[in-house]
């Protein structure tokens, strides 16, 4: 694909695998967007427990997928020129390893490469509450260029389903990676009446 955008989607083992699955579904609606999925082993397990979907079904949502151990994959190199990396959900383990530069698997390596190449990295960190170590790690990653975007729902769009809540957080993430959805529900003063 000549003028395509390459988006790496990582799904780690944190709760909230629906964010990664819905992100892949939404990115499929964009012509010229190519998705590259890294699904961790714990991500596979959590996704199955939360959604009943098996790894093969999740991989089928992406244009390309890689084993988390495959640190020789093209997306492990800055020359592969991914436009953005989104980790949805992002576990504290993944976030901490990335902040420390410990590229022990392809997910962390792909995000690390994007940071060093000054490309967009969005981490949908899924944990609460945060202790001081988590907050300091988030500060360090922000200073490195990452965007910390926990899936914290807004309610001004009057969600009626869990999917409405999930989609609202993903609409913000899609904005951050330059793939805004025309149908995204945005705050408009006066709509609350």
Image (cartoon, rainbow, N blue to C red):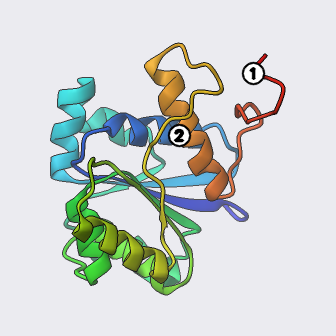
Query: Please, what secondary structure does the residue beneath circle 1 have?
Result: loop
Of residues 102 and 109, the one nearer the viewer is 102
**Dots 1 and 2: beta carbons under 8 Å?**
no
Query: Please, what secondary structure does the residue beneath circle 2 have?
Result: helix
Please tell me in which quadrant of the rendered image residue 176 appears. Answer: bottom right
Rendering coords of residue 79 (x, y %):
51, 84
Compared to 191, does 149 lie above or below?
below
Please tell me in which quadrant of the rendered image residue 54 appears. Answer: top left
Q: Residue 169 carries which label?
A: 2
Residue 106 seen in the current view: no
Of labels 1 and 2, earlier in sequence is 2
Residue at left offset 25%, top offset 79% = 103
Please give the residue where the numbered disc 1 appears in the rendered image: 192
Residue at the far top: name it: 160
Q: In which quarter of the image is the N terminus?
A: bottom right
Count the labels in the image.
2
Of residues 57 and 160, the one nearer the viewer is 160
Q: Quadrant of the C terminus?
A: top right
Q: Residue 53 carries which label?
A: none
Residue at left offset 69%, top offset 52% = 32
Horizontal side of residue 150 vs 130, given as left or right: right
Residue 159 seen in the current view: yes
Rendering coords of residue 153 (x, y %):
50, 35
Of residues 19 and 58, the one nearer the viewer is 19
How packed mark 2 is, by other alpha carbons closer than 10 Å (few <14, some 14-19, many 20 or more), is some
């Amino acid at each position: 694909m000549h003028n395509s955008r390459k988006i790496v989607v990582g799904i780690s083992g944190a709760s909230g695998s629906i964010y990664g699955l819905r992100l892949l579904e939404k990115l499929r609606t964009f012509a010229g967007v190519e998705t590259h999925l890294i699904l961790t082993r714990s991500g596979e397990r959590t996704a199955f427990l939360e959604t009943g979907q098996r790894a093969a079904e999740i991989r089928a949502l992406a244009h390309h997928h890689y084993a988390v151990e495959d640190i020789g994959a093209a997306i492990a190199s800055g020359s592969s020129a991914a436009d953005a990396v989104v980790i949805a959900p992002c576990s504290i383990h993944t976030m901490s390893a990335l902040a420390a530069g410990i590229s022990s698997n392809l997910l962390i390596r792909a995000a690390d490469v994007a940071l060093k190449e000054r490309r967009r990295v969005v981490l949908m960190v899924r944990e609460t509450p945060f202790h001081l170590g988590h907050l300091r790690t988030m500060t360090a990653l922000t200073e490195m260029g990452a965007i910390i975007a926990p899936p914290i729902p807004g309610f001004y769009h009057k969600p009626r389903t869990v999917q409405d809540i999930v989609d609202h957080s993903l609409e913000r993430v899609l904005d951050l990676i330059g793939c805004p959805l025309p149908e995204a529900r945005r705050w408009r003063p006066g709509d609350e009446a």
